[in-house]
Amino acid sequence: MLSIIRTLWDVFLHAFRKRVTIQYPEQKAYLSARYRGRIILSRDPEGGERCVACYLCAVACPVDCIALQATEDSTGRRYPEFFRINFSRCIFCGYCEEACPTYAIQLTPDIEMGEYSRQNMVYEKEHLLISGPGKYPDYNFWRVAGVKIGGKDKGQAEREAPPTDLRSLLP
Amino acid sequence: MATVYIDDKPYTADPAQNMLFTSLTLGFNLPYFCWHPAMGSVGACRQCAVKQFRDENDTRGKLVMACMTPAADGTRIAIHDPDATKFRAGVIEGLMTNHPHDCPVCDEGGECHLQDMTVMTGHDYRRYPYDKRTFRNQYLGPFVNQEMNRCIQCYRCVRFYREYAGGRDFNSFALRDLVFFGRHKDGVLENEFSGNLVEVCPTGVFTDATLKHHYTRKWDLQFAPSICTHCGLGCNTSPGERYGMLRRIVNRYNGEVNGYFLCDRGRYGYECVNSPQRIRQPLLRREGVAQPVSRAEALRAARELLAGKQNVIGIGSPRASLEANFALRTLVGPDHFFAGMADDEHRLLTKMIQVLRSTPARTPSLREIEQCDAVLVLGEDPTNFAPRLALALRQSVRQQPFAATDKMRIPRWLDHAVREAVQDDKGPLFIASTHATRLDDIAARTFRAAPTDIARLGFAVARALDTSAPATSMSGEAVALAAQIAQALKTAHRPLIIAGGGLNSESVIEAAANVARALDTVGKEARLSFTVPECNSMGLALMGAAPLSAAFAAVKDADAVIVLENDLGRHMPQPALREFFERAFHVIALDCLTNATTERAELVLPAGTFAESDGTLVSSEGRAQRFFQVFVPSGDIQESWRWLCDLGALRENSEMADWKELDDVIIALSNAIPALAGIVNAAPFSGLRLAGEKVPREPHRYSGRTAMHANINVSEPKPPDDPDSPLSFSMEGFPDQPPSALIPFFWTPGWNSIQSTNFYQKEIAGPLRGGDPGARLIESGASDGSGYFIRVPQAFAPREGEWLVVPAYHIFGSDEQSLHSAAIAEVAPKPYIAMNPEDAVLLALRPESLAEVKVDGSSYRVQVRVRPDMPKGIAALLVGVPPVVGVHLPAWGTLQPAQLPVEGGPERAA
């Protein structure tokens, strides 16, 4: 009996507490920059596509919702011919971002992805690719990797000596 | 057997081996780079360091290289010793100081031995703050792509290319940490086995250049155990598919057949599966115009052609599986089934089988060929006709010098020391051929002559071995050569005679048989190997059916003709082909690629290639091997035997009505044809389950299952069923090692590269666990007393105004299907005729000019190659490259300068 009265009293007191419910969608919740929401593909500081189609995100994905195909431009720069994420399967675990060696794939705090048709949850590269570098403004994989692409010859990457002269006999 | 101690535990080991071999055989994870199971130890990379102890009381020990330490009795090593572990990590750290940080864009990534070893030793962070050395890459042709920055200087590539495969145009350049591996300048790698560099290189310096065009990681490919269809040797391959497209082929180890290596035709011929020439829909020809039709319409048209018709004939194919040929035979009846090869080819194969069964000589596997210590090649050009055989022969000439190094007590695995001791010493290899071969550099003696003279040489060798063999009269020089060959074969432990289908000469087969028989008479166990033209020539010949001429005769009264996976234009000359189609009103063709036959057939049904069907092929060794479907093709493509079952239903064939899966066909086939009863042992039946599960075709890391097809439909389709095999189109299933015939790909925890093969073998470089796959169908009987062949051919006599045109083959081009592969087509030669300089002068033909060759009722306009290696009176015509197909050689023909000059050739200057 006493406990019932006490419970009623507690409920009554709650009516005067500060409200935590927010009026979504008129009012937006704060989500930190590291929140794991909609996935995007970013660009390097020079505006080029960061993704090099290495397939690591796809293999890291526990629900196998990423599919892509690598291709190369005429200068040897590799990029995805298509890049598809099936968001109706994605569990936003962030493993793809963790696996990405070029900071191309990133999770954003955007969570508003509701659709009436499940088919609309399939995002292709044109839906995923943004125009900026996202959370990592400075990194450019191609400046570090020792392969030749358009605009960067052998020996021009970070910490690289000029190409070896095979005809030289100097020790 | 010796007892060795690894980490203080006793193990039995082969004392003739080294400790790296022993450790890997026992399943230890010991890193290595420069050692290769097929190439032995050189101790160059210092990666397999272990600590060796004198005895159980020794606590200090010393660091040694496991690959250079014999597994002598009482050897004690520690793999997990802290000093050894640290040393190995240090070696990797050193190698990685120059590594270019490009794994994400490296084609080796995910199957990289360097990656695996780096992870195994625990190295993860580059402490070295200085610059990395860099190299410029070379263009090495359409097969191999080079990225030299990734090199770790293990020297495996140059050891394989120069020492194992006998290539000359590849070497190491420059010095110290700047050593470069490549050619002296950009250019296509000349060696026919260059593609193996992709697998030999432990990192991404050499990668598959064809894979680069449609790159997919190993973990994303769907594999199946398969058999190469580009020659008769039956090498085991592992093709990989992604998104409905065949992406690449890698070697599938079979200790008895191909071992670790494939030829470039086998490795890069796969692109024919993706060719734009593929037939993907049934085609119905009405009033001369072929229209793509639906499956239902095609079957309706077939019903009109076949239902109720009594006289339907079937033409089989030496490149179709046994099951497909048998289905056709069952559909039309054995009397109406024809073998689909030309008469001379058919006669030759029948003769080969007869010889192999009646001569007391074993038909050796490729591994046995590698171990033969005296070889006589009669009339063959192995590099171009049965390429992988040439690589085996290169190893066979090493056998005899081993006797000397054994005496010096140099273990055979100590590769560099053995090669230093042997120098250029080679065992006896005698090549009798119509023109120079790519093996002449290792031959003790070569003999270039007309086919009949080659046969006569064979007869003379037999006579020199055994005087009861028929005699020939030959020039003194040839008699001396025959005596030398006879002596070499007689003193060898494992003599081998190679002949075959290349020269199209029955007497050469008979001569080879006589040599084998004579060797048996003098108490030598001879080996006799015949090469055959296509992947299932031997199987089709074992089925026993009449050749094309009989089909040709029967076609006039036939209501309809069904041609199975066979371009008749490649087996009969053009005029005969025209006549055939004039006689045959209703032709149904089943094939995968457009060809002269499908372009004339009334109804064309799209057949699956080797990658889209299952079946059994019989190799030239007589080994029946099963290949399995790699992927389910789109559209109406299905296995030939399934199409034939559909046609059988139209004809209400009661026998075929019961065939629901491949096993039904195999069982019916083995019951119907006793010679092929053994094919049931080629691979397990489809009912096999391991721990209740099927064998997955996909690696367990296969990605993208829920996104691959999401652009078409977000709801994932059900994985396709496979009623025909114990394999599943899935990443789920039995996770451990399957029976050897069912291994789709090699993978072991920690070993993602092809080096994981080590853990599938009973002992390194030995048979796979459970025995190497395949079932031998032909075993040599004891001598049946039929004695020697006595029909010695007449000596070759040149004719005035006529030339004996003999066939020449090229590894890239002479095979029908691989020519549809872009990379192969790029290096395939144009049709040519080769002749002696004196003959060329006589005919007023200049090198590179065009000649008109009239032979076997056809006329060809081909380029002239003047070659001093050609015997006089003989001209070698490159066959198999369109338009020179279907011509029966050797035959007498005439040559004359063609009317039109070659554009831009020397003609213009003249």
Image (cartoon, coloured by chain):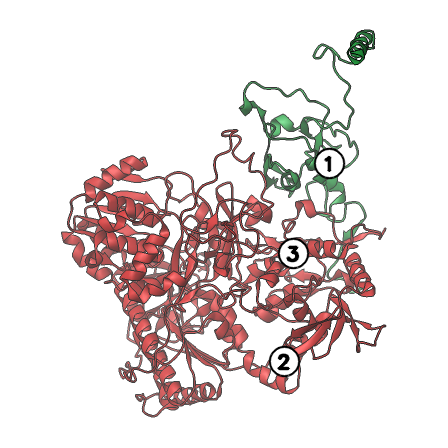
Chain colours: A green, B red
Mark 2 belongs to which amino acid? Gln
For the point 41% across and 87% down, the residue is: B482
Seen in the picture, residue A82 relative to B148 is either above or below; the reply is: above
Q: Quadrant of the C terminus of chain A?
A: bottom right
Residue in the foreground of this view, choosing between B177 and B683 = B683
Q: Where is residue B391 drawn, in percent x and y? A: 52, 69
Residue B751: mark in rendering = 3
Q: Quadrant of residue B425?
A: bottom right
Q: Are marks 2 and 1 on the same chain?
A: no
Q: What chain does mark 2 sit on? A: B
Q: CA distance from mark 2 to mark 1?
A: 54 Å
Mark 3 belongs to which amino acid? Trp
Q: Quadrant of residue A107?
A: top right
Residue in the foreground of this view, choosing between B75 and A147 = B75
Q: What chain does mark 3 sit on? A: B
The residue carrying mark 1 is: A103
- Furthest residue in direction front, as rendered: A1
* Secondary element type, mark 1: loop
Q: Where is residue B638 drawn, in percent x and y? A: 37, 44
Q: Quadrant of residue B682?
A: bottom left
Mark 1: few, some, or many residues within 10 Å (few <14, many ≥20)?
many
